[in-house]
């Protein structure tokens, strides 16, 4: 039997003050204003456009949270803040936190969503603010670079395949796959706004001759082909069950005979009550998307079987599903 929560842990779960303090500091860009030279609340207030005494209260809390340091009246950045929360740092992750902040009001409507059964947003923040969406993808690309090569090796490719990375984003997986298999050629298919970022990452990786960019909406535009392998990584949860079913059918048509589809996602366990992170992610999707959802591996396997795939298997529990076109 799993361990019971203590009362302290229950209180901790209900405590979000520090979350909003951090998000607000990133929104005000306090850490960039501090940069490498400690400054007073007065000077920082002038730089970020804020009230000095109110900002001082926030700054003190950030000191207690170990994001800032304080020496007399001067606030400095901790080394973590300097590395990850100052905008000009190459390891800045603030865009991801800005995304959470942009979704804050949607979370405030969680009760209403659950009571009425109605979604409260009609467009996802990636659609209302494509620049933020692209910046978030750039951060995810940087922090996701470790997992791509591992996935490439686990899929045991021959090495010469033609790959389609559907909704490939910044090209994180495709670039990793091309590094692991030097003869592989790939197509990254994504929305035009996203491909502007992909163009940069592919160029930085020096892979322009092996990675082609194909712009479009995978629900309505042709996918090209034939391909030997199609990868759908983390693209299902903004869509309905039916939309995903249709896309999997389209992918089937774009594959060569013997080709395979690999779907990598955050699937829920069959019970729906795990993995823990994914259960909370499902609530996030509920409040922040018009009709998205978190699905089970069995759903993806059903879409594949309906489309005509054979040897449909869950390669990695709640993470990777594969099917082969006969
Ligand atoms: C969470 S990102 C995943 C990116 C990448 N596959 C990965 O695993 O790193 C979702 C991607 O799907 C793309 N996308 C969403 N809806 C799309 C659509 N209808 N047509 C094409 N791309 C779409 C987004 O632009 C974004 O790049």
Image: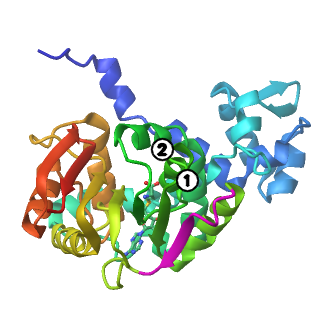
Choose between 152 and 13: the one closer to the eye: 152
Which residue does the image show at 70% across and 31% down from the upper left?
80
Residue 207 magenta? yes
What kind of element bears circle 1? Answer: helix
Q: Is residue 90 left or right of residue 168?
A: right
Choose between 6 and 200: the one closer to the eye: 200
Q: Is residue 46 left or right of residue 121?
A: right
Badge 2, how many Cα within 10 Å: few under 14, some, many 20+?
many
Which residue does the image show at 33% across and 59% down from the upper left?
229
Q: Is residue 186 left or right of residue 38?
A: left
Q: Residue 206's image quarter?
A: bottom right
Inter-mark Cα distance, 2 to 1: 8 Å
Query: Where 283 falls versus 116 (above or below)?
Result: above
The quadrant of the rendered image in which ligand 1 is seen is bottom left
Q: Which mark is residue 254?
A: none
Which residue does the image show at 56% across and 72% down from the upper left?
195
Residue 209 magenta? yes
Which residue does the image show at 30% across and 60% down from the upper left?
237
According to the image, label 1 marks what residue? 175
Badge 1, how many Cα within 10 Å: few under 14, some, many 20+?
many
According to the image, label 2 marks what residue? 148
Task: Confirm or deny contact between disc 2 and disc 1 (CB under 8 A).
Answer: yes
Choose between 5 and 161: the one closer to the eye: 161
Q: Residue 37's image quarter?
A: top right
Q: Which quarter of the rendering shows the N terminus?
A: top left
- Residue 174 showing in the rendered view: yes
Q: Residue 199's image quarter?
A: bottom right
Residue 100 is situated, as x and y percent measured from the top left of the image, at 49, 53
Residue range in magenta is 206-216
Residue 169 is situated, as x and y percent measured from the top left of the image, at 50, 62
Residue 137 is situated, as x and y percent measured from the top left of the image, at 54, 58
């Amino acid at each position: 039997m799993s361990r019971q929560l203590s009362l302290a842990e229950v209180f901790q779960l209900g405590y979000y003050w520090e979350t909003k303090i951090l998000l607000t500091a990133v929104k005000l860009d306090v850490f960039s204003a501090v940069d490498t030279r400690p400054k007073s609340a007065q000077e920082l207030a002038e730089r970020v456009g804020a009230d000095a005494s109110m900002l001082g209260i926030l700054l003190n809390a950030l000191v207690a949270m170990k994001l800032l340091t304080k020496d007399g009246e001067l606030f400095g950045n901790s080394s973590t803040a300097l590395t990850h929360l100052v905008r000009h740092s190459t390891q800045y992750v603030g865009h991801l936190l800005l995304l959470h902040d942009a979704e804050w009001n949607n979370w405030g409507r969680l009760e209403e969503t659950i009571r009425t059964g109605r979604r409260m947003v009609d467009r996802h923040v990636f659609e209302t603010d494509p620049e933020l969406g692209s910046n978030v993808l750039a951060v995810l690309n940087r922090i996701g670079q470790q997992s791509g090569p591992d996935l490439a090796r686990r899929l045991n490719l021959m090495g010469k395949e033609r790959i389609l990375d559907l909704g490939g984003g910044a090209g994180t997986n495709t670039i990793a796959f091309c590094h692991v298999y030097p003869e592989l050629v790939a197509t990254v298919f994504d929305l035009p706004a996203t491909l502007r970022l992909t163009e940069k990452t592919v160029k930085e990786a020096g892979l322009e001759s092996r990675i082609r960019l194909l712009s479009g909406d995978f629900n309505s535009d042709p996918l090209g082909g034939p391909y030997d392998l199609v990868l759908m990584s983390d693209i299902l949860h903004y869509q309905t069950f039916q939309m995903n079913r249709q896309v999997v059918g389209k992918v089937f048509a774009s594959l060569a005979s013997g080709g395979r589809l690999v779907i990598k996602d955050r699937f829920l366990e069959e019970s729906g009550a795990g993995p823990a992170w994914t259960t909370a992610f499902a609530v996030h999707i509920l409040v922040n998307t018009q009709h998205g959802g978190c699905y089970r591996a069995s759903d993806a396997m059903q879409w594949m079987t309906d489309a005509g795939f054979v040897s449909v298997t869950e390669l990695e529990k709640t993470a990777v599903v594969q099917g082969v076109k006969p």
